[in-house]
């Protein structure tokens, strides 16, 4: 391997932050490069969807609930975000889970409470559980604006790019807890890529990197599980059953990746009363953003954050231009915070 550069990609925002925090990139030889993929759910939410959330926050009587990271993600207009709208009087509240949003709905029966459902398969079961609970209890003033995404379609879209230059993937341990090993077997089977399910401690990440390099050296492509203490081959059948009951696959829009068929989670017709898109007739328009921000290229692993012309200059955590600098799991935020 000494005569070529090996590119490994993590598709998990937590891995991105831990790799930066532990200085793992500085421990590797120059011929081994770590790239960040579309593993940050806030980062892959496109501006037109943020615009729709901002418009929703202005609906009379609506309480909008969301994770903290989403508060400062810009829409198509620079500086316009949910935090700004809250400062102008919109009732936007930070919560830690969809269930928190449901509790707010119970406490405010005369208000419509909407939760912004952001995340991958890790948070999808919790969001589905809140919808199911609201349905069972008849809490009809609670709904979810689903922005949930699927991991597999995004990786397939990346791999279909002729410029994709990655030899192995560090697979997210928490997504694998839900999907199991079987949910990631598409990597070697369909894409010919080695994959290793990794934990989140620095030593666990380094172990996974070593396992990937061993496969690459041997010319092999297999899925290995370096997180067996948590991840089972079958994953979490109960969580998957809950998702299948409440959520349905749908075509979705991704920042940096565009429209990907069957890549997002909508809400099943049975639970339509808890679907904010239907309740408020939310329409996702087309957003034109004039910016030099290269967040989309960072998400695709085509650009190191420090190579973006705005990084650390016109784009800093206090005044971010794009979501990769906003989110606690964003590659730009990690690079800025830990100077990697």
Image (spheres, rainbow, N blue to C red):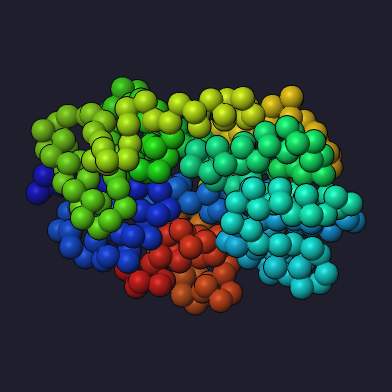
Is residue 142 shown above or below 186?
below
Q: Locate residue 244 relative to residue 217 in the image: left or right.
A: right
Q: Nearer the viewer, residue 231 or 55?
A: 231
* Looking at the image, residue 86 lies above or below residue 303: below
**Percent coordinates x, y for residue 274 in the rendering:** 76, 37
Horizontal side of 71 relative to 285 (left or right) equals left
Residue at (84%, 58%) from the top-left corner? 58
Looking at the picture, tell me which residue is in the foreground, 164 or 196. Answer: 196
Residue 114: x, y in percent?
Answer: 75, 49
Residue farthest top in this picture: 189
> Who is closer to the viewer here, 185 or 283?
185
Residue in view at x 57 percent, y 30 percent: 243
Q: Which residue lies at the image location 44% right of the left edge and 35% below the top edge?
A: 178
Looking at the image, residue 270 sits to the left or right of residue 322; the answer is right
Total tally of numbered discs in the picture? 0
The quadrant the C terminus occupies is: bottom left
Q: Is residue 157 above or below residue 55?
A: above
| Residue 119 percent coordinates (x, y) | 55, 45
Which percent across, then down, holds residue 103? 71, 51
């Amino acid at each position: 391997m000494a005569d070529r550069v090996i590119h490994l990609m993590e598709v998990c925002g937590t891995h991105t932050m831990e790799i930066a925090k532990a200085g793992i990139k500085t421990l590797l030889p120059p011929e081994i490069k770590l790239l960040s993929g579309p593993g940050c759910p806030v980062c892959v939410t496109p501006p037109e969807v943020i615009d729709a959330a901002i418009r929703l926050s202005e609906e009379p009587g609506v309480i909008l609930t969301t994770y903290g990271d989403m508060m400062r993600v810009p829409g198509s207009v620079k500086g316009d975000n949910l935090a700004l709208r809250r400062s102008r009087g919109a009732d936007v509240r930070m919560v830690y889970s969809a269930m928190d949003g449901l509790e707010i709905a119970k406490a405010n029966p005369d208000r419509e409470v909407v939760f912004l459902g952001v995340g991958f398969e890790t948070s999808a079961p919790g969001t589905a559980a809140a919808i199911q609970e609201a349905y069972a209890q008849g809490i009809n003033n609670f709904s979810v604006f689903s922005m949930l995404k699927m991991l597999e379609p995004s990786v397939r879209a990346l791999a279909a790019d002729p410029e994709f230059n990655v030899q192995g993937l560090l697979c997210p341990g928490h997504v694998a807890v839900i999907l199991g090993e079987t949910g990631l077997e598409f990597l070697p089977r369909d894409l010919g890529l080695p994959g290793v399910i990794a934990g989140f401690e620095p030593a666990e990440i380094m172990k996974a990197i070593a396992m990937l390099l061993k496969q690459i050296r041997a010319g092999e492509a297999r899925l290995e599980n370096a997180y067996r203490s948590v991840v089972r081959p079958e994953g979490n059948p109960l969580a998957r059953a809950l998702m299948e009951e409440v959520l349905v696959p749908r075509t979705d829009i991704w920042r940096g990746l565009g429209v990907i068929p069957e890549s997002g989670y909508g809400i099943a017709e049975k639970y339509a009363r808890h679907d904010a898109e239907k309740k408020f007739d939310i329409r996702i328009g087309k957003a034109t953003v004039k910016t030099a921000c290269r967040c989309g290229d960072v998400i695709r692993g085509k650009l190191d954050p420090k190579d973006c012309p705005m990084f650390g200059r016109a784009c800093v955590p206090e005044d971010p231009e794009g979501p990769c600098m906003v989110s606690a799991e964003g590659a730009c935020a990690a690079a800025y915070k830990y100077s990697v």
